[in-house]
Image (cartoon, rainbow, N blue to C red):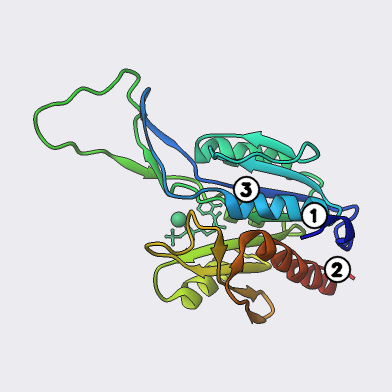
């Protein structure tokens, strides 16, 4: 992708993106997390910047780096991601939630390293806040885009999330062993609040980022001409 001749479709727009996994501590040396690499969210951040947007990337721990002109805010837990998003969202036009947020955190994080007890271990978990739903519902003028990674009934679950979280658009993909998470390519279906359904072919995540943003721009400009 030659970024020098990318159309500046997002010039003057502020785009907020979440990416990567979150990390939920058990004790000072252990945590719960997932297989997200952050590649999709980082690719979207770079593509949005290439299209002229001012980009803020709220990121969980990843092995990736971003260009200097992207503002990156590093967090670890879902609660930290929510507070970073809440303080960055003001004056943003578009919010794209590509992060794989841990659904649960430890009810009580041990302050000292946990010791083996010679038997099984029960951990009590509680649900994390839904960053996307909270942000979308609190900012009705914000154009919100979610991701839905599902192993089965992909379109049905994605449609449910589009409605429940009051999104403008959701990017749905099938995940499984060697599919979706932690890969360089992805195949997605895009569903919009006004009932459009676009099936994209499998492609490299960097190319896919531009295709997703093209569709976001078209839908955004249709709603806000
Ligand atoms: N999401 C979020 N905060 C959470 C959970 C999810 O912002 N606590 C966002 C993700 O970034 C993604 C979308 O919501 O854009 C859907 O995430 P997903 O895990 O597929 O949906 P959940 O609502 O968590 O439902 P479930 O995992 O039970 O399928
Ligand atoms: Ca989830």
Relative horizontal placement of residue 15, taking residue 108 as reference (left or right): right
Q: Quadrant of ligand 2?
A: bottom left
Report helix, strand or loop for mark 3: strand
The tag on residue 93 is: 1
The tag on residue 169 is: none
Q: Residue at x 78, y 36 (%)?
A: 68
Report helix, strand or loop for mark 1: loop
Per the image, the residue denoted by label 2 is 224
Q: Quadrant of residue 3?
A: bottom right
Tag 2 or tag 3, which sits nearer the N-term?
3
Per the image, the residue denoted by label 3 is 18
Residue 76 placement (x, y as % from top left): 52, 34
Tell which of 12 and 36 is nearer to you.
Answer: 36
Tag 1 or tag 2, which sits nearer the N-term?
1
Q: 41 above or below 168?
A: above
Whether disc 2's CB lies below 8 Å from ligand 1 is answered no
Whether disc 3's CB lies below 8 Å from ligand 1 is answered yes
Tell which of 200 and 146 is nearer to you.
Answer: 200
Residue 101 placement (x, y as % from top left): 50, 48
């Amino acid at each position: 992708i030659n970024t020098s001749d990318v159309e500046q479709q997002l010039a003057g727009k502020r785009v907020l993106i979440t990416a990567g996994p979150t990390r939920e501590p058990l004790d000072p040396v252990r945590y719960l997390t997932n297989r997200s690499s952050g590649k999709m969210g980082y690719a979207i951040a770079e593509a949005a910047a290439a299209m002229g947007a001012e980009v803020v990337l709220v990121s969980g721990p990843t092995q990736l780096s971003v260009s200097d002109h992207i503002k990156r805010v590093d967090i670890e837990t879902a609660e930290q991601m929510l507070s970073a998003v809440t303080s960055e969202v003001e004056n943003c036009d578009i919010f794209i939630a590509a992060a794989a947020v841990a659904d649960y955190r430890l009810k009580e994080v041990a302050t000292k390293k946990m010791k083996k007890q010679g038997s099984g271990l029960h951990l009590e978990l509680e649900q994390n806040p839904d960053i996307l739903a909270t942000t979308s519902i609190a900012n009705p003028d914000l154009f919100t885009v979610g991701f839905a990674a599902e192993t089965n009934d992909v379109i049905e679950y994605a449609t449910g999330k589009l409605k429940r979280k009051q999104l403008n658009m959701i990017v749905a993909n099938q995940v499984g062993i060697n599919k979706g998470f932690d890969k360089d390519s992805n195949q997605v279906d895009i569903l919009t609040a006004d009932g459009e359904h676009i099936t994209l072919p499998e492609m490299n995540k960097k190319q896919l980022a531009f295709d997703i943003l093209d569709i976001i721009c078209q839908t955004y400009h249709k709603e806000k001409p």
